[in-house]
Image (tube, rainbow, N blue to C red):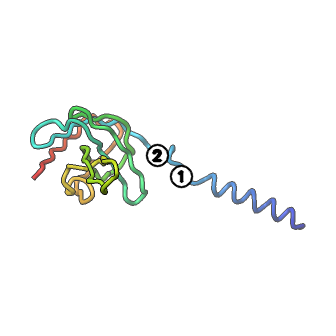
Amino acid sequence: MTGWHRFGILVVTCAVVVGCGRSKDAREMCPVTGSVTLDGQPLREGEIYFKTTAMGEIDVLPIENGQFQGDVGAGTRRVEIYAYHEKEVIPMPGEPAEKTRENYIPARYNVQSTLTAKIASGSSTPLEFEVTSR
């Protein structure tokens, strides 16, 4: 077998192996709806993350007037909730003032979250998350 034949076989083999991997588009997506309250009131606006730590998949849905809806990958997902307000950063003398976003939801509901949700096709029960600022 010549070098070109071996090279051709190698290229075809690589294409088949790479092409057979699981693509993000192949995962099952399920519609979800739900609500988020902060201290008993609907969270005005924010984001809710549905994460799988094993696969590294993150689905983010916007929260508006305490409600969210959209498609999320099936399975047990870690849930993180974020909401931001603008905060002015104290500038260096002679520099213009800058603004930054600051998350005001406690870490126990996002970076340290133990919240989970089981997402399954055909599930129509709205998800509810009650967050407290204390």
Position of residue 97 measured from the top left corner of the image (x, y, whole percent): 30, 48
Q: Amino acid at mark 2?
A: Arg
Q: Nearer the N terminus, badge 2 or badge 1?
A: 1
Position of residue 85 measured from the top left corner of the image (x, y, whole percent): 24, 43
What residue lies at 14% left-to-right and 42% top-to-bottom? 38
**CB under 8 Å between discs 2 and 1:** yes
Alpha-carbon neighbours of circle 2 within 10 Å: few (<14), some, or many (≥20)? Answer: few
What is the secondary structure assignment of the residue under circle 2?
loop
The one of 59 and 1 positioned closer to us in this rendering: 59
Position of residue 130 measured from the top left corner of the image (x, y, whole percent): 15, 44
Q: Is residue 49 left or right of residue 36?
A: right
Disc 2 to disc 1, C-alpha distance: 8 Å
Residue at the extreme right: 2
Query: In which quarter of the view is residue 33 placed?
Result: top left
- What mark, if any, has residue 79 been given in the picture? none
Q: Which residue is mark 2?
A: 27
What residue lies at 37% left-to-right and 42% top-to-bottom? 72
What residue lies at 86% left-to-right and 62% top-to-bottom? 5
Name the quadrant of the N terminus: bottom right
Residue 101, above or below 54:
above
Residue at the extreme top: 65
Q: Is residue 28 left or right of residue 131?
A: right
What is the secondary structure assignment of the residue under circle 1?
loop
- What mark, if any, has residue 22 been given in the picture? 1
Q: Amino acid at mark 1?
A: Arg
Alpha-carbon neighbours of circle 1 within 10 Å: few (<14), some, or many (≥20)? Answer: few
What residue lies at 24% left-to-right and 47% top-to-bottom? 87
Query: In which quarter of the view is residue 111 placed?
Result: bottom left
Position of residue 65 measured from the top left corner of the image (x, y, whole percent): 21, 32
Number of callouts: 2
